[in-house]
Structures are given as structure tokens and as C-alpha cells.
Image: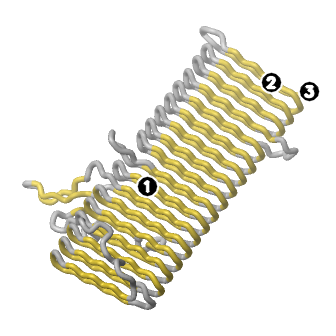
Amino acid sequence: MIGKRSIRQTSAADVNDATVTQNGEGNQSEITQAGNNSGVTVSQDGTDNASTVEQDSNFASTTVTQTGNANSSDVDQTGNLAIITVTQNNSEAADEGNTSTVMQSGTAAIINVDQEGQRNLSTINQSGSAALINVTQDGVGNDSDVGQTGALATVSVTQNGSENESDVNQTGSGAIVNVNQDGNRNDSDVIQASSLMTVDVIQEGDDNISITDQRAAGILTDTADVDVTQRGNGNFSDVRSVANASEVAVTQFGDGNRSEVDQNAADVRVRLPFVGNVNLPVLNENQNATVIQSGDDNTGRIAQFGRNQNASITQIGDGNASGTPGGAVGITQVGENQEAFLNQTGNGNSSVIEQGTNATNRVLLTSASSDGNFAEVNQFGDDGESTVRQNGDFNDAFLNQGGVDNVSTILQNGNSNLANVGQGGTGDLSTVSQTGNSNIANVSQNIGGGIGIPMDPNR
């Protein structure tokens, strides 16, 4: 048995406890303690494991367990009443073990790290009080980086497979982040600056990418949660939630699907005496966005700037598009209390819904405000194209389109207009343009009765 152990204790008051147990060859353990009534326990069983613990805290505890070969653990603990547990197991004969770095300064905080496999890397910096971080890695070459400053917050990262990457930066108090990666080369990036909110990311498969930037503020009666589920390969999700009390749910099943959701607080332009026009932020936004994609190579984009708006995209099939990456947005809502629903079943369909886009750069002008509009698009077939644009108040647009190569455009400018379009043949073309108030248009081409009738005639 060949090993190296070093214990240094400096205390002005009560005694600290330090225990090192080594079994194998080339193991190294260094412990430095400078607090009161704290304990450190290090157990090494294998070859060439290395552990360093610096503890300057009161009534704190650190436990490091290393099994196998070439594992490395570095702990810097300054938080009082805090707990750190690191478990590393590299059962293979490989020279490259697991690496864990923990910096903990939060009071009454808890960190658990469990690494199984080779070349897994975990880095944690925790300064939030009464906070919790759990990191579990099982596989080869997984990488987890967690920064947590929020009090009473929780982060849980689970990685199974190879070369998965997770980056979590959590500053919100009482917030929760859960990341679960099962597969290879999945990438999740979460920024959470909201208090009392939740982000859940599930990635199953290979080469999926999820980006979540949640800066929304919840209110006592509502939440601003983000849920992302990716099952398949090569899917991409980008969620940016800034509006207050806004919720986002993204579900992707298949390969090569792409979803982008952007929810931001709008401004309202008002005229103040002796000042002129001033843009003031709209408070207590309550926007919901849902994207469901089942199939391959579908694209869905939602952008919402305003109050109390709902947007939903459901795409089943292959190659459907509601928006384009870096270009057109599938559903754009600028205004108040608006709803948009887009359903595409089939292959190669494309659709765009725009509500209130005459407003200037995410600003609700009192002369061009868009309020209470409703749009529903259902495309069942292949290679259909749909465009709906609504500017004004309380306009309703309903489109049901089946068949092949059909094209429909609905343009509404004014108030309380109603458009119903139903197409079910091949190569049908429909354009409805309504300017003014209380206009009604019904279009039915090569389709059975009932299609194109409003889902809710009382709207």
C-alpha cells in the first residue's frame, strides 16, 4: 500500500474531525481545516486517485469517496452548516478517471456529486443559502457546469451516456432546474434568473440541443415555467421567456425538428403632458406558448410581445414549417388578449399567423393596438401554404385545408371581421382580404360541409 495523506487543522475553538482511508497505490489526499465543529472524511480505494479539501466553515461536513483509478476531487467549502458529498467510481483500467470541482460558500447548502465511468467532468460553484445541487453522471466524457447563487433554489442534473454537456446558471431564489440527458452528445444550456420558477429539460437520443433563457418574473397567482422534452436525434429548441408569468412547453419527437419561442414584455406608448410620447413597460404579462412536433425536420417559431396571449403549434409529419430559422416567424402576436392555434398534419406544409404586426417594433400604439383577435389554422395534407394576418380588434379567422398544394391567404384590417376558409382539393387557391368592420367571408372549395365553420360560433 503506497499513498500520501496530509491533514492540517487550525482552530481557535472547538475541534474539527478529519479521517482519511486509503487502499491501493499512488492515492493522494490533502485536507486543510480552519473552522469549528466541522468534519471531513476521505476514502480512496484504487490507484492514483487525488483528493483536496479546504474547509473553513463551522458545523459543516465534506465526504469524498473514490473508487477505481485516476479520479480527481477538489473541494473548497466555506459555508457554515453546509454539506458536500462527492462519489467517484472509475472501474475501468483507463488512466483517465472522473474530475469533480466544488466551491461552496452558501450557508446550510447541500451538494451531491455522483460520477460513474470515465472522463466525466463536474464543476459546481454554489453561494446560495439553503440551496441544493445534485449532479449524477454515468458514462464517458459527460460535462456538467452549475453556478447557483439563489437562496432556497434547487438544481438537478442527470447525464447518462457519452459526451453530453449541461450548463446551468441559476440566480433566482426558490427556483428549480431539472436537466435529464440520456444518450450521446446532447447539449443543454439553462439560464434562470427568475424566482420561484421551474425549468425542466429532458433529452433522450443523440445530438439534441436545448437553450433556455428564463428571466420572467412570476406572480403570486401564476407561474413562468419552461418545459422542454426532446426524444430523437438532432432536435433543436431555443426558448427565451422574459414576459412576466409566461409559460412555455416544447415537445419534440423525431429527428431534425427545430423550435424557437421568444416571449418578451412589450411596451405601451402613452402621451404625457409637457413630455410627449413615452414608452412604458407593460406589467404582469401572461403569455403561454406550446410547440408539439412529431416527425422529422419540422420547424416551429413563436414570437409574442404583449399581454395575455396564447400560441400553439402542433406539427405531425415531416418537413412541415411554421416559420423559418432566422427568418419568418410561424406565429407572431403583438397586442393584448390574442389567441392563435396552428395544426399541421402531413408533409411539407407551411403556415404563418401574424396578429398586430402593424405595431411599431413591439410597441402597442394606442392608434394601432391589436386586441382580442383569434386565428386557427388546420392543415391536413401535403405541401399546403397558409398565411393569416390580423390587425385591429376582435377579428376571427378559421382555416381548414386538406388535399395537396393548396394555398390560402387571409388578411384582416379592422374590427370584428370573420373569415372562414375550407379547401380540400388539389391546387386550390383562396385569398380573403377584409378592410373595415364586421365583414363576413366564407370560402369552401372541394371540401365537405361543415369545414371552415368556426369552432366556437359564439366568439
Mark 2–mark 1 CB contact (< 8 Å): no
**SS for tag 3?**
loop
Going from N to C along the chain, the mark reached first, 3 or 1, is 3
Residue at 41 percent of width and 71 percent of height = 330
Image quadrant for the N terminus?
top right
* Position in image of residue 60 (x %, y %): 60, 21
Residue 434 vertical placement versus 148 (above, below)? below
Residue at 55 percent of width and 33 percent of height = 132
Task: Tell me the quarter of the picture where residue 17 sits.
Answer: top right
Give the camera-side residue of 353 and 217.
353
* Position in image of residue 338 (x %, y %): 29, 62
Task: Tell me the quarter of the picture where residue 136 sits.
Answer: top right
Picture disc at residue 248: 1
Mark 3–mark 2 CB contact (< 8 Å): no
Q: Report the residue marked by disc 3.
A: 1
- Marks 3 and 1, Cα distance to the nearest angstrom? 56 Å
Q: Report the residue marked by disc 2.
A: 5
The furthest residue to the front: 449
- Marks 2 and 1, Cα distance to the nearest angstrom? 51 Å
Residue at 57 percent of width and 72 percent of height = 297
**Count of marks placed on residues:** 3
